[in-house]
Amino acid sequence: MFKTGHRFWSVVFTGEGAEDVGGPYREHITEMCSELMSKAVPLFIPSPNQRSGVGTHRDCFVISPSATLPMHLGMFEFLGRLMGGAIRSNEPLSLYLPPIIWKKIV
């Protein structure tokens, strides 16, 4: 999975008349990233600057130190594959990570 330069899947929103020529796919990716940066998925937590409301990058999230279960590690592996595939397909991801994390990734 994610070894191609093309879109990974096709998206159809039930009840909507949109054809997947890019819009629904991008919306789905954006929604996935929003869910990753929420309390629904235990991988990320708000950054200290976000929690205290001071400093720069207050919209960023950091890796949760409690995300250590095998299930969490599998989720991180999926996220890594998603990021790699997004780079290959030139599809931006709406992940709000602080510069220090991006520097480690790149």
Image (tube, rainbow, N blue to C red):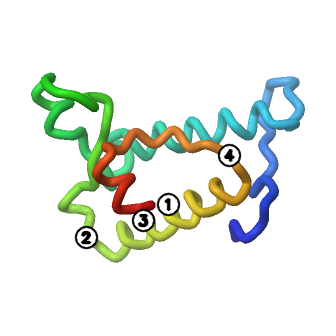
What's the distance in space between the residues labelled 2 and 3, CA to CA?
Answer: 10 Å
Q: Which amino acid type corresponds to the residue marked 4 in the rendered image?
A: Glu
Please tell me the numbered disc located at residue 94: none
Q: Which residue is at a point 10% across and 28% down the rendered structure image?
A: 52
Q: Is residue 71 left or right of residue 63?
A: right
Q: Which amino acid type corresponds to the residue marked 2 in the rendered image?
A: Thr
The answer to whether the residues at label 1 and label 3 have Cβ atoms under 8 Å apart is yes
Vertical side of 3 occupied by 7: above or below: above
Please tell me the numbered disc located at residue 68: 2
Provide the secondary structure element on which disc 2 rests: loop
- Decide which of tag 2 and tag 4 comes sooner along the chain: 2
Q: Which residue is mark 3?
A: 76
Quarter residue 6 falls in: bottom right
Report x, y in % for residue 45: 25, 45
Camera-nearest residue between 85 and 29? 85
Q: Residues within 10 Å of mark 1 (few under 14, many from 20)?
A: some
- Decide which of tag 3 and tag 4 comes sooner along the chain: 3
Q: Which residue is mark 4?
A: 91
Q: Which amino acid type corresponds to the residue marked 3 in the rendered image?
A: Phe
- Decide which of tag 1 and tag 4 comes sooner along the chain: 1
Vertical side of 7 occupied by 24: above or below: above
What's the distance in space between the residues labelled 1 and 4, CA to CA?
Answer: 14 Å
Q: Residues within 10 Å of mark 3 (few under 14, many from 20)?
A: some
Provide the secondary structure element on which disc 4 rests: loop
On-image quarter of the C terminus: bottom left
Quarter residue 85 falls in: bottom right
Camera-nearest residue between 34 and 98? 98
- Decide which of tag 1 and tag 2 comes sooner along the chain: 2
Q: Which residue is mark 1?
A: 79
- Decide which of tag 2 and tag 3 comes sooner along the chain: 2
